[in-house]
Image (cartoon, helix red, strand yellow):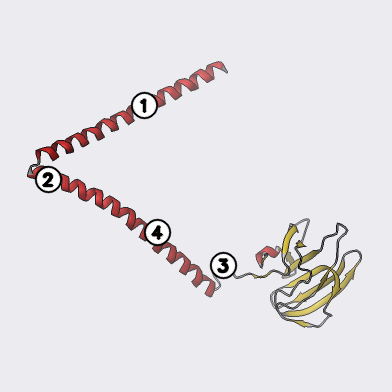
Amino acid sequence: MKSQIINTLNVLLINSSKILKKIARKSIVAIGILLLILLLKIININQANILLNSVKETINYEFSIVDDSKRIFNKAKDLLDNSQKVLQVFNLGVKDKYPTPISGSIHKGYHEETNKGWDIKSNGDHEPIAILDGVVKEVILMDNKGYYVTVETGEFQYTYGYLSKAYVTIGDTVAQGDFIGYLGTNKDGYKYLRFEVIKDGKYINPENYIELE
C-alpha cells in the first residue's frame, strides 16, 4: 500500500513538472512577442506599423467572432423554437397536455406494478373537474374508498376515486372543466383524489397526459 502511494506521488510530480514547463515556455513566447511589438512601436517604421495594424485587425476580428457566435446561437435558438411549433402542428413532437383534474401534489405516484394511478393530495381544491369531454361510463361506491367515477372519451378512459359525493350518473355527458364530485376526507384528515388513466385497456401513467399544477 505504501509503495503504491509513493508511485502515485511520483507520477503526480512528473506530470506537474511537465505542465509547469509547458506554461513557462508559453509565457516566455508571449513575453517575447510583447517585447517585439513594443520595440517596433518605438522604432515606428512602415514595416512596424503594418505589423501592428495586422495584429490590431486580428484582435478586432477575434472580438467580432464573439459577437458573431452570439448571433449564431440566437438564430439557432429561434430555429429550434420554430421547429417545435411545427412539430406540434403535425403531431410529430411534444403533445399538449390536458388540465389537472384538481390542484394539489402527488402523494403517491404511478408505478406499473404496484400503483396504477395517482393519489393527489388536495391543497384546498375539493371538486375535481373533467379533463376532457366524455360520457360517464361507471359510478361505483367502493367500501372505505368512496365513489369511483369513470369517464370515457374517444381516446381513453379516466377515473376519479375517493369521492364522498358524485355529481354525475351513468350516461351523463360531461364537458372539459365540469365538476365530477366532491372529495372525501381520509383517516389522516386530508383530502385525496384517486386518478387513473386507461388507454387500449391498459393503465398508463397520467403524467403522459396531465400537467399537474
Find the residue positioned furthest to the left: 45
Residue 21 to residue 84: above or below: above
Q: Is residue 21 left or right of residue 10?
A: left
Which of the two discs, 1 and 4, labels the residue nearer the N terminus?
A: 1
Q: Count residues near mark 2 (Cα–Cα under 10 Å), then give few for <14, some for 14-19, many for 20+.
A: some
Residue to which mark 3 is pinned? 94
Q: Nearer the viewer, mark 4 or mark 2?
A: 2
Badge 1 marks a residue whose secondary structure is helix
Front residue of this view, candidates 61 and 9 = 61
**Residue 37, position as x, y percentages in the image:** 17, 38
Quarter of the figure with residue 171: bottom right
Q: Nearer the viewer, mark 2 or mark 1?
A: 2
Q: Count residues near mark 1 (Cα–Cα under 10 Å), then give few for <14, some for 14-19, many for 20+.
A: few
Q: Residue 73 carries which label?
A: 4
Question: What is the C-alpha distance between the residues marked 1 and 3?
Answer: 51 Å
Residue to which mark 2 is pinned? 49
Badge 2 marks a residue whose secondary structure is helix
Q: In this view, does 155 lie to the left or right of 89?
A: right
Which of the two discs, 2 and 1, labels the residue nearer the N terminus?
A: 1
Tell me the residue at 45%/23% (across/down).
Answer: 11
Task: Tell me the amino acid under the disc marked 4.
Answer: Phe
Task: Tell me the amino acid under the disc marked 2.
Answer: Asn
Q: In this view, does 195 lie to the left or right of 94?
A: right
Question: What is the C-alpha distance between the residues marked 3 and 4?
Answer: 23 Å
Residue 40 to residue 59: above or below: above
Badge 4 marks a residue whose secondary structure is helix
Which of the two discs, 1 and 3, labels the residue nearer the N terminus?
A: 1
Q: Which part of the image, by quadrant, shows the N terminus?
A: top right
Q: Which mark is residue 18?
A: 1
